[in-house]
């Protein structure tokens, strides 16, 4: 997975509190690039329905039998995934929903029900995926994935999951995630209009090939408007929509792990905290304040990665290495294993310290504590090591305490203990399920579903009103038909009078709307002038970052690019992190940087040459001052 780290500080916002020091963009693998386009609006202006689990919900196998006679229609829908995902007309919100977390290794699901006192977990399941079913987030075997989705529902514990409406966390190898800052005087509508231009200027993507969405929040002093932006290739998203539809499931929202973790663990926290989620291939650190994400970075340390290192060090297979990792952890007696785990734990600790310090420096508010999530976060001795290394409290995220979550009565004591022990790996799906029980679940956070699918869940109040109006009209006409002609005539006359009055009111409303449009036009022009002045002060070193990325050759995989802003005492600099095929490629890359005419100096420490093959490296370069030219 390629990860770019962008540091974005507007000149006139460096002293504004509650702003973000840095933000990350999760970059999709080049071989899985998008091929189609349909941007999704990020404006939060519509009410959104909840989903319904009765009478439409039923076991997945039963649903397939019921619809088995519609093979021709199913084949047609496979060619058009948006038609297959069409949930039809929705009238009522629901009190329960299913969260699904998809990764290269597993798929997990949990059905959550909202009550007056909190939430109830009704059923859950986790199934391992055969190698190659999903690779780097891209579905490679749709048939197997569909069959396992059905099995995920029908073999859930303690009962099958009957709810077909799902909220899905997509693999973040597919998704760009970035944070932008705008003047606090701009409205969300104006920011949504300006955001596509800002995105294509800042990120190496074209939105015509992407679905995108954004959420907004103001800083504490209301001077800065934060926009958290996410986008994913349309081709990949449509593939997920198609497979879920073939499995007779109806996706309501596609989002990321980070918002789900925040919702499940620290949504009510006012002061800054950090969440460290350790996944299979990488770890993600999220800075959260007032229940909203303020910064995200990825660290190339993951549970599967650690298993590979242990297998190579001990000369054993990956299954045995996984068992050894789980049983011994950082407390085992084998020096090689402890060395590998402590080295990677030290990297996580340092990133936590650095990212937290950056947030504190930018906002003046220190990060109070760290939360651990993800299956690999249960590694023995890891929590204690991170707590000692960072000097701050480190706790395992517990959704049962943070969200007043309890088990349904159908769970046995043994099943409850099993779920509690593996709770860190289910935090994301629980957070998705909690979102699904909200009335505005389709738009209460980032949602990368195609607009044609998402729109069905945004317009359920209108569908309800139209059908109610139709029913009332039918009753009214039936009554009129049974009355005398004279009474009917008087009613018609009265209706005409009311219609005339309504037309007069509509004309008055049109005049008011015209005046409002005029005022909004003047306001928008003023906002655009502020935005032009705001963005005119961009740093000249952006072009250097693009040139630096262009110097990367074959055999080099970039994992991080961190920019350091220039000031009166020091020029701009950048830190490049990545993995090279061998140490000679690292040496060649450092020489290439030294020859560049826009780079003043290159620092490639000797630690870059320790690993002969698949060598991780970290190179620091200092750009030439633009005012020296």
Image (cartoon, rainbow, N blue to C red):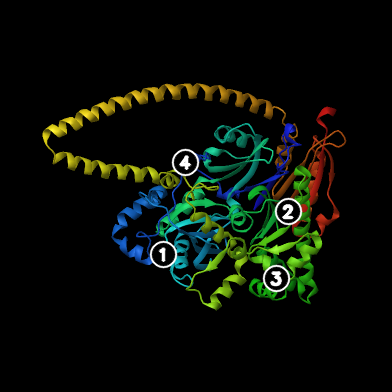
Per the image, the residue denoted by label 4 is 46
> Regarding mark 2 in the picture, which secondary structure is present there?
strand
- Which residue corresponds to the image point at 79% horizontal and 45% vertical from the top-left? 361
In depth, the one of 402 and 425 nearer the eye is 402
Crowdedness near tag 2: few (<14), some (14–19) or many (≥20) residues, C-alpha within 10 Å = many
> Regarding mark 4 in the picture, which secondary structure is present there?
loop
Question: Residue 595 at what x, y percent from top left?
Answer: 81, 39
Question: Residue 160 at what x, y percent from top left?
Answer: 43, 69
Tell me the quarter of the picture where residue 568 sits.
top right
* 12 sits left or right of 527 in the view: right
Crowdedness near tag 3: few (<14), some (14–19) or many (≥20) residues, C-alpha within 10 Å = many
Per the image, the residue denoted by label 3 is 311
Per the image, the residue denoted by label 2 is 580
Mark toward the start of the polypeptide (3 vs 4) = 4
**Which is more foreground, mark 2 or mark 3?**
3
Tell me the quarter of the picture where residue 455 sits.
top left
Q: CA distance from mark 1 to mark 2?
A: 48 Å
Question: Residue 288 at what x, y percent from top left?
Answer: 67, 51
Q: CA distance from mark 3 to mark 4?
A: 52 Å
Q: CA distance from mark 3 to mark 1?
A: 41 Å
Residue 416 visible within the image: yes
Mark toward the start of the polypeptide (4 vs 2) = 4
């Amino acid at each position: 997975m390629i990860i770019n780290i962008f540091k974005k500080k507007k000149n006139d916002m460096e002293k504004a509190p509650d702003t973000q020091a840095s933000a990350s963009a999760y970059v999709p693998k080049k071989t899985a690039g998008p091929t189609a386009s349909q941007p999704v609006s990020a404006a939060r202006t519509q009410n959104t329905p909840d989903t319904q689990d009765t009478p439409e919900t039923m076991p997945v196998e039963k649903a397939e039998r019921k619809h088995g006679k519609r093979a021709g229609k199913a084949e047609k829908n496979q060619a058009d995934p948006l038609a297959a995902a069409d949930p039809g007309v929705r009238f009522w919100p629901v009190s329960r929903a299913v969260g699904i977390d998809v990764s290269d290794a597993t798929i997990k699901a949990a059905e959550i029900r909202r009550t007056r006192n909190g939430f109830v977990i009704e059923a859950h399941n986790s199934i391992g995926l055969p190698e190659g079913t999903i690779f780097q987030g891209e579905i490679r075997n749709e048939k197997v994935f569909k069959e396992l989705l059905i099995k995920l529902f029908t073999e859930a514990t303690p009962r099958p999951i009957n709810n077909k409406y799902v909220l899905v966390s997509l693999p973040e190898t597919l998704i760009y995630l970035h944070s932008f800052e705008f003047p606090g005087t701009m409205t969300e509508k104006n920011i949504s209009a300006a955001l596509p231009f800002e995105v294509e200027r800042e990120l190496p993507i074209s939105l015509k090939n992407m679905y995108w969405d954004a959420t907004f929040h103001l800083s504490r002093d209301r001077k800065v408007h934060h926009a958290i932006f996410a986008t994913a290739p349309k081709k990949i998203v449509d593939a997920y929509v198609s497979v879920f539809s073939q499995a007779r499931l109806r996706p309501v929202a596609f989002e990321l792990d980070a918002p789900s973790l925040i919702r499940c663990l620290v949504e009510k926290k006012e002061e800054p905290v950090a969440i460290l989620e350790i996944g299979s291939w990488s770890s993600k650190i999220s800075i959260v304040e007032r229940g909203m994400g303020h910064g995200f970075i990825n660290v190339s340390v993951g549970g599967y990665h650690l298993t590979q290192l242990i297998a190579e060090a001990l000369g054993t297979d990956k299954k045995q290495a996984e068992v050894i990792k789980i049983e011994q952890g950082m407390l085992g007696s084998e020096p090689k294993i402890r060395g590998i785990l402590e080295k990677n734990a030290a990297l996580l600790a340092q990133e936590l310290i650095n990212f937290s310090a950056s947030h504190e420096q930018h906002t003046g508010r220190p990060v109070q504590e760290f939360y651990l999530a993800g299956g690999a976060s249960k590694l023995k001795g890891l929590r204690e090591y991170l707590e000692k290394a960072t000097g701050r409290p480190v706790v395992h995220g517990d959704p049962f305490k943070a969200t007043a979550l309890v088990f349904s009565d159908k769970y046995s004591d043994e099943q409850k203990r099993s779920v509690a022990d593996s709770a860190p790996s289910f935090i994301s799906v629980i957070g998705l399920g909690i979102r699904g029980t909200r009335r505005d679940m389709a738009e209460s956070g980032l949602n990368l579903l195609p607009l044609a699918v998402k729109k069905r869940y945004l317009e359920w109040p209108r569908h309800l009103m139209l059908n109610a109006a139709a029913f009332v009209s039918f009753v009214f006409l039936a009554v009129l038909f049974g009355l005398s002609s004279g009474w009917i005539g008087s009613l018609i006359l009265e209706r005409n009078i009311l219609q005339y009055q309504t037309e007069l009111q509509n004309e008055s409303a049109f005049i008011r709307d015209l005046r409002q449009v005029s005022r909004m036009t003047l306001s928008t022009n003023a906002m655009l002038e502020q935005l032009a002045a705001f963005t005119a002060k961009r740093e000249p070193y952006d072009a250097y970052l693009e040139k630096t990325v262009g110097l990367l050759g074959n055999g080099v995989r970039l994992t991080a690019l961190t920019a350091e802003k220039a000031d009166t005492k020091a020029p701009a600099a950048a830190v490049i992190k990545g993995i090279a095929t061998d140490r000679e490629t690292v040496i060649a890359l450092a020489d290439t940087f030294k020859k560049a005419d826009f780079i003043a100096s290159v620092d490639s420490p000797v630690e870059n040459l320790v690993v002969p093959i698949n060598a991780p490296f970290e190179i620091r370069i200092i750009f030439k001052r633009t005012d020296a030219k």
